Image: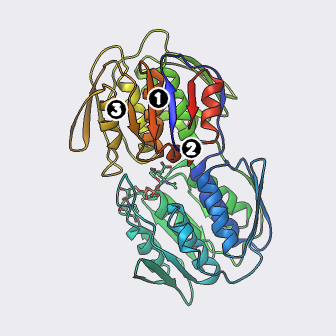
Amino acid sequence: MEKLIINGGDRLKGDVTVSGAKNAALPVVAAALMANGESMLEDIPGLRDVFCMMEILGAMGASVSFQDNVLTVNPNGSEFAEPPYNRVSKLRASYYLMGVLLARQRYARIAMPGGCAIGNRPIDLHLKGFKALGAETSIDHGVVELKASRLSGAKIYLDYPSVGATINIMLAATLASGLTTIENAAREPEIIDLANYLTVMGARIKGVGTDVIKIEGVQELVPAQHRIIPDRIESGSYMIAAAATRGDVYVRNSLSEHLKSLVAKLKEMGVIIQEDIEGVRVTAPNGIRAVDIKTLPHPGFPTDLQPQMMALLTQVDEGTSMVIETVFENRFMHIDELKRMGANISLDGRGALIKPSPLSGARVSASDLRAGVALIIAGLVADGETEIENAYHVERGYEKIELKLKDIGADLKVV
Ligand code: EPZ
């Protein structure tokens, strides 16, 4: 998908179903390499990032197959070669293989993950954890090399509750000897989902979802079956789009307990959220008001919904909103694109002030997958036609997004 063309003005109406969570699937697929045998993973979303991870595993000698959102992975062997550079450099989440390979073969050599549009994305906390477990780490010519004669449990304090570092250290600690404690750990639902899979494989993990995670190392992990949780960011993106277009959308397979901060904010704005066992219904019959947003680690407001929320805030009926981004240092690239469509946003440092204004269609460019969806939401409410370039970013995190949006009344086409 190179370009998305949207004709704005339609209210979204109908029923959209959320796919499995990208950010749970990626670490779970990598972790399957730690079992001796075939794991079966269900509700895996058919996304570019997932296919990229599959290609990496295949290139390393594992057998992988994907059919109807079910992914089977069999490591097939003991020693894994270095993951191929050309694929690793395309998928940041391939760095989970550091924890997996260190745990499984006490050695890992993998290209450094690149930075990206939203920030330089260091991995210092990951390496701090691996060193604490007994690994020697070196970075040479953009390649990280980790080796350990043995891995022993340790107490690790994370200076920042990094999702990636929490996951990578947890992966390595499952096959270390002794107890590992991760303090100031990240609490995202995707980490809980990974821990549930690892536990069925035989890992001993306590406290996931709190800021202290304890892992008692075990000798080996066995294959397991696991169903991935629904994608809370995809779910939130459709909820925000429904509110922005003043529509009436049922977001199926949406776990509102994973979206407490978004639901609270939308209700604060006057959006009506009706929850039932299957999902949530989103309407805004009484209009919507401005609100302030500050992104924080879970359970705070998710940074991955900040761009989408900003598009909504340009469409409130009254009031000025303030958005503060505390997680990434450069996650405001969508502001310039929204301003090209007529948005009234002023930026000072990490804070953005948004006043309501009508939007008109324009040619805009997506800088990353979440900014891309923010531009889609803006295009849905804008007057006229919006052309979104670099729309391929969106395919990385939103399964069948053009079909799902068309099914609820969006007038868009893929070029
Ligand atoms: C995960 O990235 C997600 N990616 C991101 O989603 C998400 O925005 C982020 O968590 C925060 O929720 C995946 O799960 C694949 P972090 P991650 O480590 O693990 C700093 C999307 O749109 N930091 O919690 O990289 C870092 O620079 C993506 O799906 C260090 O300083 O996030 C950042 O400022 C975008 N040193 C902050 O922590 C480290 O060693 C949060 O990063 C690691 C991180």
**193 relative to 110 in the view: left or right:** right
Q: Is residue 145 above or below residue 296?
A: below
What residue lies at 42% left-to-right and 42% top-to-bottom? 366
Q: How many marks?
A: 3
Query: Residue 135 appears at what percent x and percent y?
Result: 49, 83
Q: Does any atom of ligand 1 lie closer than 8 Å to the CB of label 3?
A: no
The amino acid type, in three-letter code, at marker 2 is Met
> Mark 2 sits on what residue?
1
The mark that comes first in sequence, 3 or 1, is: 3
| Viewer-nearest residue: 125 or 311 | 311
**Ligand 1 is in which quadrant of the figure?**
bottom left
Query: Residue 326 appears at what percent x and percent y?
Result: 32, 47
**318 relative to 14 in the view: left or right:** left
The amino acid type, in three-letter code, at marker 1 is Ile
Circle 2: element type: loop
> Quarter of the image containing the C terminus?
top right
The amino acid type, in three-letter code, at marker 3 is Leu
Residue 301 seen in this snapshot: yes
> Mark 3 sits on what residue?
338
Circle 1: element type: helix
Residue 343 lies in quadrant: top left
The mark that comes first in sequence, 1 or 2, is: 2
Find the residue positioned furthest to the bottom: 149
Q: Is residue 401 above or below residue 147?
A: above
Between marks 1 and 2 in the image, the one whose residue lies nearer the viewer: 2
What residue lies at 48% left-to-right and 24% top-to-bottom? 380
Proximity of marks 3 and 2: CB atoms separated by less than 8 Å? no
> Mark 1 sits on what residue?
377
Q: Is residue 46 above or below residue 288?
A: below
Circle 3: element type: helix
The mark that comes first in sequence, 3 or 2, is: 2
Q: Is residue 348 above or below residue 243?
A: below
